[in-house]
């Protein structure tokens, strides 16, 4: 038996969304191949019979399972799927003894470990497993789908490519050797400062107080993470953010190198007015380019929706749960 870390899990309902009376909720844990124990909320349709199709959900990048990933998981469980929403390594209730670090490899592994857990769960049909990644975890979900042949269907919602934005800046505005050099030099200097101080300096999370001249996408994040709409005490983005060096390795690593070799189904969903929409458009273009498996790939653009509208639906129920249900039913049963 692979040894688990001892985690202290909250037992009361502490989500940013209401509890459904249509599903059974419980806390579960599982271990990834780096020995990190991950914490998850599991949602099972009440009165479910037989082995169920299953979906693992995570994201956004810097959020916790009590926020939008839990909402997605609970809603999909209401629609007949066994689901888990998990905290990635080093965040939330999950383990890892250096907090607030990220890694393209470890975070991809987190999704694969979730698939391990579902594959071995007695309530799950191991041939009917899908994943949902939100925001930065949309990119991780696509990266996982390129590696994990057990995944039959993937949804990436309002996705970010975290390696692209770290290496090139927003809208690729810092895509130069000089800009990347300056980032690398700053983080190398910060490593030494952290070691001398004995603690890792936090990057600050979503800016607070919000400047009047902040770009719209910063206001968009503030409106979710810093208000009653989505604030959570364990969320990095709601509080002090990642460590300054938390995403250091992202600068050197594209995660979507082999996305056009994904044989399983992929649905990308993005808001028309989201600042981040170019990530999904470009990821879809790359995924189908020179691909033998383009027929089961789809890009869905939601009219008028901004980035965080796909976190909780916004004011107009923008999250296309009917579409996702039909997508998973089609491809998990194929």
Image: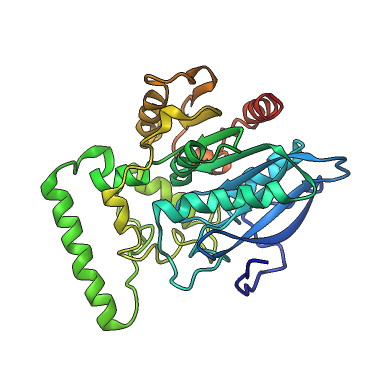
Residue 32: image x %, image y %? Answer: 56, 59
Q: Residue furthest front?
A: 1
Residue 97: image x %, image y %? Answer: 48, 73
State left or right for residue 233 relative to residue 143: right
Vertical comparison of 291 with 205: above or below? above
Residue depicted at 81% across the width and 48% down the height = 21
Tell which of 208 and 77 is nearer to you. 77
Q: Which quarter of the picture shows residue 106?
A: bottom left
Residue 238: image x %, image y %? Answer: 46, 60
Tell which of 24 and 207 is nearer to you. 24
Residue depicted at 86% across the width and 40% down the height = 50
State left or right for residue 315 relative to residue 220: right
Q: Can residue 316 be seen in this view?
A: no
Q: Which residue lies furthest to the left in this view?
A: 178
Residue depicted at 54% across the width and 64% down the height = 92
Which colour style is shown?
Answer: rainbow
Q: Which quarter of the picture shows residue 2?
A: bottom right
């Amino acid at each position: 038996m692979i040894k688990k870390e001892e985690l202290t899990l909250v037992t009361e309902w502490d989500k940013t969304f209401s509890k459904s009376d249509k599903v059974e909720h419980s806390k579960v844990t599982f271990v990834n191949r780096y020995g990190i124990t991950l914490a998850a909320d599991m949602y099972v349709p009440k009165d479910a019979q037989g082995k169920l199709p299953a979906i693992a959900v995570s994201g956004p990048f810097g959020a916790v399972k009590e926020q939008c990933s839990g909402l997605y998981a609970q809603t999909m469980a209401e629609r007949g799927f066994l689901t888990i929403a998990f905290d990635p390594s080093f965040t939330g209730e999950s383990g890892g003894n250096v907090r607030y670090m990220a890694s393209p490899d470890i975070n991809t592994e987190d999704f694969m470990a979730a698939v391990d857990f579902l594959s071995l769960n007695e309530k799950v049909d191991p041939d009917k497993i899908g994943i949902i990644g939100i925001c930065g975890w949309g990119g991780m979900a696509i990266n996982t789908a390129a590696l994990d042949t057990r995944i039959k269907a993937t949804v990436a919602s309002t996705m970010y490519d975290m390696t692209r934005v770290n290496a090139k800046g927003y809208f690729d505005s810092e895509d130069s050797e000089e800009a990347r050099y300056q980032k690398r030099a700053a983080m190398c200097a910060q490593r030494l400062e952290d070691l001398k101080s004995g603690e890792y300096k936090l990057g600050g999370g979503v800016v607070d107080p919000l400047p009047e001249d902040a770009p719209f996408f910063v206001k968009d994040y503030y409106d979710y993470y810093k208000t009653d709409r989505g604030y959570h005490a364990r969320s990095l983005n709601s509080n002090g953010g990642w460590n300054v060096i938390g995403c250091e390795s992202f600068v050197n690593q594209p995660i979507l190198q082999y996305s056009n070799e994904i044989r399983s189904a992929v649905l990308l969903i993005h808001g028309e007015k989201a600042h981040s929409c170019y990530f999904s458009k470009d990821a879809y273009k790359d995924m189908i380019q020179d691909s033998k498996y383009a027929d089961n790939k789809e890009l869905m653009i939601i009219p008028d929706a901004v980035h965080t509208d796909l976190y909780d639906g916004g004011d107009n129920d923008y999250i296309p749960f009917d579409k996702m249900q039909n997508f998973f039913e089609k491809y998990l049963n194929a």
